[in-house]
Image (tube, helix red, strand yellow):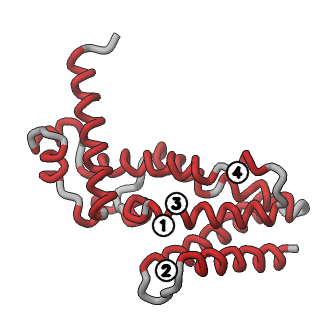
Amino acid sequence: MTSKRELKKNALRAALIDAARLRIQGFGLRKLRARDIANDANCALGSVYTAFEDINELVLHVNSITLSALGEALDTSSEEALTPGAKLEALARRYFRFAQQNKNLWQALFEHKMADGAPFPEWHLKEHSVLFQNITTPLLALCPDATDEDIDLQTKIIFSAVHGIISICLQERIIEAPIKQLERQLQQFVRTYVQGLK
């Protein structure tokens, strides 16, 4: 049975995670400060470090929520009738829309670094599988003779290419174009990539 003390700590952790998530959503990861999070959660600054080892651990939990939401956004189980190529286009489109609509939270997934170069915990690394899991099945259908290693590599390559295009587009420095046009170009890139695989 959970003690009152544990329930109180869990409530504090939830409040701090929510406050940090809203801060990142509104201002970005780089402007995240423990004092602001504590103020938003209506608790003392020391409470942040009672509930979490440090800010890095808190950000991991925010990123965990973002990855879960991204996984739901990328779920293509309702689109079974689509061809493998069309599924990959749909994935690119969904990924682009999620990044556009959740820009700061999405960027925090890739900007966050652990203190002193420490490795990310294994549980958090496993959560990143949502970035790749929907890509593998259509690639297997397109390349039935490919080895597992080839599929794994192709999955990472197509993800990296799509992610890179979206990342540069959302910076609005190198590429400036209407969102609808960028979305079409992204789909055209995936279509061309798929034709190359065939």
Q: Quadrant of residue 18?
A: top left
Residue 117 on image: x %, y %: 34, 62
Q: Name the residue under label 4.
A: 76
Q: Are the two marked residues, 4 and 3, in contact with CB atoms closer than 8 angstroms?
A: no
Please tell me how crowded label 4 is: few (under 14), some (14-19), or many (20+) other residues with Cα within 10 Å: some
Residue 6 on image: x %, y %: 26, 21
* Disc 1 versus disc 2: nearer the observer: 1
Tell me the kind of residue under disc 2: Ile
Which is nearer the eye, 75 or 114? Answer: 75
Q: Which of marks 1 and 2 is nearer the N terminus?
A: 1
Q: Are the two marked residues, 1 and 3, in contact with CB atoms closer than 8 angstroms?
A: yes
Query: Residue at horizontal 30%, vertical 51%?
Result: 22
Tell me the kind of residue under disc 3: Phe
* Relative height, residue 17 to residue 12 (above, below): below
Query: Residue at horizontal 76%, vertical 77%?
Result: 193
Q: Which of marks 2 and 3 is nearer the N terminus?
A: 3
Q: Is mark 1 on a helix, strand or loop?
A: helix
Q: Are the two marked residues, 1 and 2, in contact with CB atoms closer than 8 angstroms?
A: no
Cα–Cα span, label 1 and label 4: 19 Å
Q: Mark 1 points at which residue?
A: 100
Q: Is mark 3 on a helix, strand or loop?
A: helix
The tag on residue 165 is none
Q: Name the residue under label 2.
A: 168
Q: Earlier in the sequence, mark 4 or mark 3?
A: 4
* Relative height, residue 60 to residue 140 (above, below): above
Q: Which of marks 1 and 4 is nearer the N terminus?
A: 4
Tell me the kind of residue under disc 4: Thr
Q: Is mark 2 on a helix, strand or loop?
A: helix
Q: Is residue 108 left or right of residue 99?
A: left
Residue 177 on image: x %, y %: 52, 85
The tag on residue 98 is 3
